[in-house]
Image: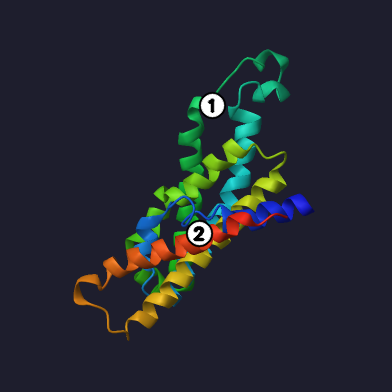
Amino acid sequence: MQEILSVFVRSIFVDNMIFAYFLGMCSFLAVSKNVKTAMGLGIAVIFVLTCTLPINYLLENYVLKEGALVWISPEFAGVDLSFLGLIIFIAVIASFVQLVEMLVEKISPSLYASLGIFLPLMAVNCAILGGSLFMQQKDFPNVGMATVYGLGSGVGWLLAIVGMAAIREKLEYSDIPKPLRGLGMAFIITALMGIGFMSFSGIKI
């Protein structure tokens, strides 16, 4: 239980996709102008990460790795399909992004319209693909840990974009020098939030 909690907390605060690795910055900066829109995209990212990581974990360990197909027959012990990993991961992610896009369009057309092109672009969101690639590197012992890591990474991304959106909404009423308005101030805030999140690297569970 302690190990699961450690993976969950670390994926949110210490290994935050935005502030530790700066992955998914395009949609993070573009959609973080409004809290409601940011919340919608953040929930979609949580769903996609939580669903795709365990599937990609199973594919990695039971299909793609060298010797992963030994469960079919000992004759496949030398088969290595790891070169297909990136293509398979993207295919799984794209499938779930398509599902999310259809659900959002049906449930909340206004959110679908406000997210615009960034909803289908989640298929190539480097934060989501990064979750699967980091899962490979971390070599989790079971699919449950991979799922917790996916959930935590999604929550961390949601926390980052909603926090950013809340700050940018408040800045609309602030007297900011003209050259820094918009994207310039967004970069400065992102840097400061990244420095703030560095303090979580001292967390030990």
Query: Quadrant of the rendered structure where residue 66 is?
Result: top right
Query: Quadrant of the rendered structure where residue 134 is?
Result: top right
Which one is earlier in the sequence, the residue at label 1 or at label 2?
A: 2
Q: Read off the residue under disc 1.
A: 82
Q: Is residue 131 visible?
A: yes
Q: Position of residue 143 (x, y in %)?
A: 69, 43
Q: Position of residue 199 (x, y in %)?
A: 56, 60
Q: Is residue 32 above or below residue 26?
A: below
Q: Position of residue 87 (x, y in %)?
A: 45, 35
The three-letter amino acid code for the residue at tag 1 is Ser
Q: Is residue 120 above or below residue 94?
A: below
Query: Quadrant of the rendered structure where residue 175 is?
Result: bottom left
- Which of 39 and 72 lies nearest the eye of the viewer? 39
- Which of 122 and 182 lies nearest the eye of the viewer? 182
Side (left or right) of 68 relative to 20? right
Q: Secondary structure at mark 1?
A: helix
What distance separates the C-alpha of mark 1 from that of mark 2? 26 Å
The three-letter amino acid code for the residue at tag 2 is Val
Q: Is residue 106 visible?
A: no
Q: Read off the residue under disc 2.
A: 45
Residue at 32% x, 84% y: name it.
174
Side (left or right) of 123 relative to 54? left
Extreme residue in the left direction? 179
Extreme residue in the right direction? 1
Tell me the quadrant of the picture where the C terminus can be found. bottom right
